[in-house]
């Protein structure tokens, strides 16, 4: 295939995709998203191919990310444990991806299914946000909309599960859950083993500990034991706590989260997270401001 660049989507024929996936063989099926299956395909070319097919069935063609997803690295005993510095880098990459769809697109997009399984890891152990099948858009990024309940339990914010209200802050909440996962190595829903069917959310576990007068000792018990002594996690824990505030107005924006994680990836200084709390603003002037901004897009943060 010629004339293909990374700046333009490519339309593939159904026959091309069927051939590239061995007729959509189960052996080439590598995942299942909210709205479709994911297949590995060999598409020869001089550059990475990103495109689509609209013949009968609908297909999206993404670059292949060979290192699986963050959930597999955190929760599988067959994977080597991720060092703390790598976890922070993956968090920063993912935050940048979300910052882009929240801050630099018109309309503003809300992912609605941020979770560790939807953060892919490339060969350099950098993170990419994936699976936009449940994405919803709004003309003003901080306006709340009503929606049917979709997504993954354990990552859903209170205002979404109770009232179906969506805004970029539901992605912020889910990202906070991912931060707690990075700290603990534990899944978003935890089995307690007191009763056969009892389970508790990871957020509730951390909130319970953080509400203690001296949470330090208890927090260390929640840290992923595979990290050894390599976990200066206090600031990330504070950031995760801010992201998972019950009141969406008190959660930071993804832009503020990126700033915080950039500081953490290059410094051990503690941060003043109180400065990250901000009231939502849905004025039209913000939309026009986004239209005038032309940020450098780091595509490695998106898949």
Image: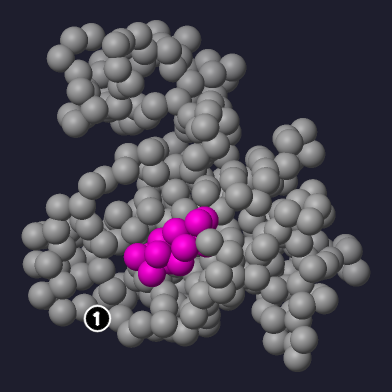
Apparent side of residue 132 relative to residue 187 in the rendered image (left or right) = left
Residue 26 image position (x, y, % from top left): 57, 20
Please state which of residues 120 and 219 is positioned toward the viewer in this rendering.
Answer: 219
Query: What's the magenta bit mostly, secondary-structure-wise?
Result: helix
Q: Quadrant of residue 269?
A: bottom right
Apparent side of residue 186 relative to residue 26 in the rendered image (left or right) = right
Residue 134 belongs to the span the image colors magenta: no
Residue 73 image position (x, y, % from top left): 66, 41
Q: Residues within 10 Å of mark 1 (few under 14, many from 20)?
A: few
Apparent side of residue 292 relative to residue 163 in the rendered image (left or right) = left
What colour scheme has been applied to the protein in the rendered image?
Answer: one colour
Q: Residue furthest right?
A: 194
What's the residue at 73%, 54% (across, down)? 230
Give, as a single range, the part of the protein colored magenta: 254-266
What's the residue at 26%, 45% (across, down)? 297
What's the residue at 30%, 27% (across, down)? 50
- Up-down relation of residue 129 to residue 269 (above or below): above
Q: Quadrant of the N terminus?
A: top left
Q: Quadrant of residue 210?
A: bottom right
Residue that mark 1 sits on: 281
Counting labels gives 1
Q: Quadrant of residue 212?
A: bottom right
Q: Residue furthest bottom?
A: 213
- Up-down relation of residue 151 to residue 203 (above or below): above
Residue 197 image position (x, y, % from top left): 82, 64
Residue 262 belongs to the span the image colors magenta: yes
């Amino acid at each position: 295939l010629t004339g293909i660049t990374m700046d333009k989507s490519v339309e593939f024929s159904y026959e091309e995709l069927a051939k590239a996936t061995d007729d959509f063989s189960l052996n080439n099926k590598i995942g299942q998203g909210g709205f479709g299956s994911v297949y590995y395909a060999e598409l020869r070319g001089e550059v990475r191919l990103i495109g689509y097919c609209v013949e009968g069935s609908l297909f999206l063609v993404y670059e292949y990310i060979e290192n699986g997803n963050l959930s597999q690295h955190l929760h599988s005993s067959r994977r080597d444990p991720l060092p703390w510095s790598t976890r922070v880098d993956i968090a920063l990459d993912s935050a940048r991806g979300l910052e882009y769809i929240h801050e630099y697109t018109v309309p503003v997009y809300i992912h609605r299914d941020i979770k560790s399984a939807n953060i892919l890891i490339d060969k350099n152990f950098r993170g990419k946000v994936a699976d936009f099948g449940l994405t919803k858009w709004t003309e003003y990024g901080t306006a709340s909309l009503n929606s049917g309940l979709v997504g993954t339990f354990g990552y859903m914010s209170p205002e979404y599960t109770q009232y179906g209200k969506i805004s970029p802050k539901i992605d912020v909440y889910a990202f906070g859950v991912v931060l707690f996962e990075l700290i603990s190595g534990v899944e978003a829903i935890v089995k307690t083993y007191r009763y056969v069917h009892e389970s508790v959310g990871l957020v509730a576990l951390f909130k319970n500990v953080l509400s203690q007068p001296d949470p330090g000792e208890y927090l260390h018990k929640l840290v992923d034991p595979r990290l050894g002594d390599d976990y200066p996690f206090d600031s990330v824990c504070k950031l995760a706590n801010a992201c998972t505030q019950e009141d969406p107005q008190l959660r930071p924006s993804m832009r503020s989260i990126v700033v915080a994680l950039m500081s953490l990836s290059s410094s051990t200084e503690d941060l003043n997270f109180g400065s990250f709390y901000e009231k939502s603003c849905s004025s039209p002037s913000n939309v026009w401001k986004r239209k005038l901004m032309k940020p450098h897009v780091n595509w490695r943060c998106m898949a």
